[in-house]
Amino acid sequence: MTNIRQEIANSTRATSKSDLLPLGSIVILKDGEKKLMIYGRGQMTPSTMQGFDYIACLWPEGNLDEEFMYLFNHQDIDEVFHHGYADAEDAEFLELFMWG
């Protein structure tokens, strides 16, 4: 049986865990018109098992429904407007889950 955590870590596009932005970060994507708030990292689509660095919702609207969820990779970010909160617990999560 394949370890889903390892599949996610192997399929993401960030070069290292230090490249990943914390949850709550506000970004705009290349060619984007609207700011997004990151609320998940290391996401995988169930149908294709394709990995993405982030899942985000519109900012300031928040998570409205599935139609407004955005999956993207670190290199798709054009500008970071706000870095979310990160502490030792977040670092431990990245170490164990994302690159464990």
Image (cartoon, grey):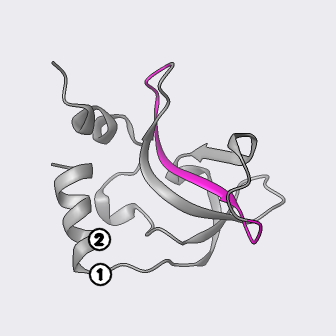
From the viewer's perspective, tell me whether residue 48 is left or right of residue 33. left
Amino acid type shown at disc 1:
Asp
Q: Secondary structure at mark 1?
A: loop
Whether residue 60 is in magenta: the answer is: yes
Query: In the rendered view of the protein, which quadrant contains the N terminus?
Result: top left
Q: Do labels 2 and 1 touch, CB within 8 Å? A: yes
Q: In the rendered picture of this protein, how many numbered marks are placed on residues?
A: 2
As rendered, which of 6 and 89 lies closer to the eye? Answer: 89
Residue 68 vertical position relative to residue 47 in the rendered view, above or below: below
Residue 56 appears at what percent x and percent y? Answer: 60, 55
| Quarter-of-image position of residue 93 | bottom left
Q: Which residues are magenta?
A: 48-61
Q: Residue at x 49, y 77 (%)?
A: 84
Q: Residue at x 74, y 47 (%)?
A: 68
As rendered, which of 45 and 35 lies closer to the eye? Answer: 45
Provide the residue designation for mark 2: 90
CA gap, disc 2 to disc 1? 5 Å
Residue 22 appears at what percent x and percent y? Answer: 43, 69
| Quarter-of-image position of residue 21 | bottom left
Residue 34 appears at what percent x and percent y? Answer: 80, 62
Residue 18 appears at what percent x and percent y? Answer: 32, 66
Provide the residue designation for mark 1: 87
Q: Residue at x 52, y 60 (%)?
A: 39
Q: Secondary structure at mark 2?
A: helix
Q: Residues within 10 Å of mark 2 (few under 14, many from 20)?
A: few
Residue at the right extreme, as displayed: 33
Residue 75 vertical position relative to residue 39 in the rendered view, above or below: above
| Quarter-of-image position of residue 8 | top left
Amino acid type shown at disc 2:
Asp
Residue 77 vertical position relative to residue 70 in the rendered view, above or below: below
Whether residue 1 is in magenta: the answer is: no
